[in-house]
């Protein structure tokens, strides 16, 4: 039986939601991940340090006994946010970055940024503190084709931000295109990117295979096979700019299976296993540890985890449905048999 042991990985992009859903989402990620960058796009977004502190406490209440899981908190940038909040965030030990959602780009982003130039004073402060800026990189202009929104964002906004703030650590989140891979590869070392398991596994045909499949709908939307191949090459390249961020984003079956379904793929129940599957198919399992357990920590200037996780070639079935109270969630790979299974190696 083939098996690898790696340092415990971290998830550098995660949606845990709030309230009773935390009892399901937190254990699903704490199962294998040691830390996660927690997205602030709640229905009432996390816009202050004190809101982030309270949210973190609610998350920690749901960590299963005997497991360690460190939620790394982020703030949601807004046009009118004060630079004092950035100063407070920098001084706070639990805040690791600020997230830029262009207003209207995705789930719970209506209170995001309307004009990126309005937040330049915030970005200047962050650059001074070397605090990471996490970016949902899609334009919201309805005239731009949905498949081009990431590439247009690079030209219109990301390039000017990178040029104006050369000290600012930037994570271009959940990149989906060859254009984004090329941009990040050529950018200076302060610019990195997360890559999801679903964008490595699927292309846009999956979304419409034999009918419309709402559980594969996410933003940025799945792209072409050529894009997927470029992402796979980047993830397995050993280049430290590319690291794991699942963007696991649960919505209830009612919210997903709707005439206007929500964007988001709930991958946490099988995320690490899915990365292992796709890295193995690419004959690059030896590249998984750095991608999952090293490069992100180094970018965020955090120590590597010391606990280990074993990933074994062993069949197991992903649950068809996961419940949280009365709510039901369909995870990625629901009901499928995966051939890699991850388990933490528990030490004292
Ligand atoms: O598919 C997505 N779901 N993309 C995002 O950017 C947000 C996320 C969510 O919060 O549901
Ligand atoms: Zn996300």
Image: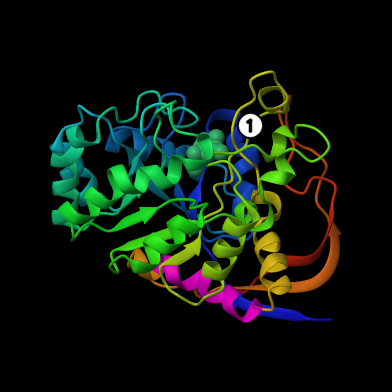
Q: Is residue 292 magenta?
A: yes
Q: Dot 1, how many residues are within 10 Å of its Cα: few (below 14), some (14-19), or many (20+)? A: many
For mark 1, give the secondary structure. loop
Residue 130: x, y in percent?
A: 21, 58
Residue located at (71% from left, 55% from top): 270
Question: Taking the image as drawn, is residue 292 in sight?
Answer: no
Q: Is residue 37 magenta?
A: no
Compared to 36, does 304 lie above or below?
A: below
Colour logic: rainbow
Taking depth in this image into account, of 203 and 201 the one nearest to the observer is: 203
Residue 20: x, y in percent?
A: 60, 30
Residue 295: x, y in percent?
A: 44, 71
Q: Is residue 252 left or right of residue 333?
A: left
Q: Quadrant of residue 283?
A: bottom right
Q: Is mark 1 within 8 Å of ligand 1?
A: yes
Give the residue at mark 1.
251
Residue 264: x, y in percent?
A: 60, 37
Compared to 142, does 194 lie above or below?
A: below
Q: Is residue 75 left or right of residue 193?
A: left
Taking depth in this image into account, of 263 and 160 the one nearest to the observer is: 160
Outermost residue toward the top in this view: 259
Image quadrant where one finds the N terminus = bottom right
Question: Taking the image as drawn, is residue 161 in sight?
Answer: yes
Compared to 296, does 248 lie above or below?
A: above
- The number of numbered discs placed on residues in the rendered structure image is 1
Q: Is residue 217 left or right of residue 57?
A: right
Residue located at (32% from left, 47% from top): 155
Taking depth in this image into account, of 306 and 253 the one nearest to the observer is: 253
Dominant SS in magenta: helix
Q: Which residues are magenta?
A: 284-297
Residue located at (48% from left, 64% from top): 243
Residue located at (37% from left, 71% from top): 298
């Amino acid at each position: 039986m083939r098996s690898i042991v790696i340092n415990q990985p971290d998830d550098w992009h995660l949606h845990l939601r709030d309230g009773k859903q935390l009892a399901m989402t937190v254990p699903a990620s704490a199962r294998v991940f040691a830390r996660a960058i927690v997205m602030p796009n709640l229905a009432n977004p996390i816009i202050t340090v004190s809101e982030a502190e309270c949210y973190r406490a609610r998350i920690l209440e749901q960590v299963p006994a005997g497991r360690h899981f460190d939620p790394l908190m982020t703030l949601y940038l807004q046009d009118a946010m004060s630079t004092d909040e950035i100063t407070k965030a920098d001084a706070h030990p639990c805040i690791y970055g600020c997230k830029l959602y262009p207003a209207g780009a995705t789930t719970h982003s209506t209170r995001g940024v309307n004009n990126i130039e309005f937040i330049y004073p915030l970005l200047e402060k962050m650059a001074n503190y070397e605090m990471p800026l996490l970016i949902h990189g899609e334009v919201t202009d309805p005239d731009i084709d949905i498949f081009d929104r990431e590439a247009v964002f690079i030209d219109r906004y990301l390039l000017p931000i990178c040029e104006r703030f050369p000290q600012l650590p930037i994570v271009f989140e959940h990149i989906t295109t060859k254009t984004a891979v090329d941009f990040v590869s050529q950018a200076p070392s302060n610019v990195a990117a997360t890559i999801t398991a679903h964008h490595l596994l699927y292309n846009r045909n999956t979304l419409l295979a034999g009918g419309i499949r709402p559980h594969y709908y996410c933003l940025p939307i799945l792209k072409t096979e050529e894009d997927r191949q470029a992402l796979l090459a980047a993830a397995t390249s050993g280049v430290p700019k590319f690291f794991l961020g699942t963007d696991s984003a649960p919505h209830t079956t009612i919210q997903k299976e709707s005439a206007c379904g929500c964007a988001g793929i709930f991958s946490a129940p099988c995320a690490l296993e899915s990365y292992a599957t796709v890295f193995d198919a690419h004959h690059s399992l030896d590249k998984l540890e750095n991608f999952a357990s090293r490069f992100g920590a180094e970018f965020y200037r955090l120590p590597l985890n010391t606990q280990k996780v074993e990933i074994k070639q062993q069949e197991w079935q992903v649950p068809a449905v996961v419940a949280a109270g009365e709510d039901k969630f369909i995870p990625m790979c629901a009901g499928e048999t995966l051939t890699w299974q991850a388990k933490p190696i528990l030490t004292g």
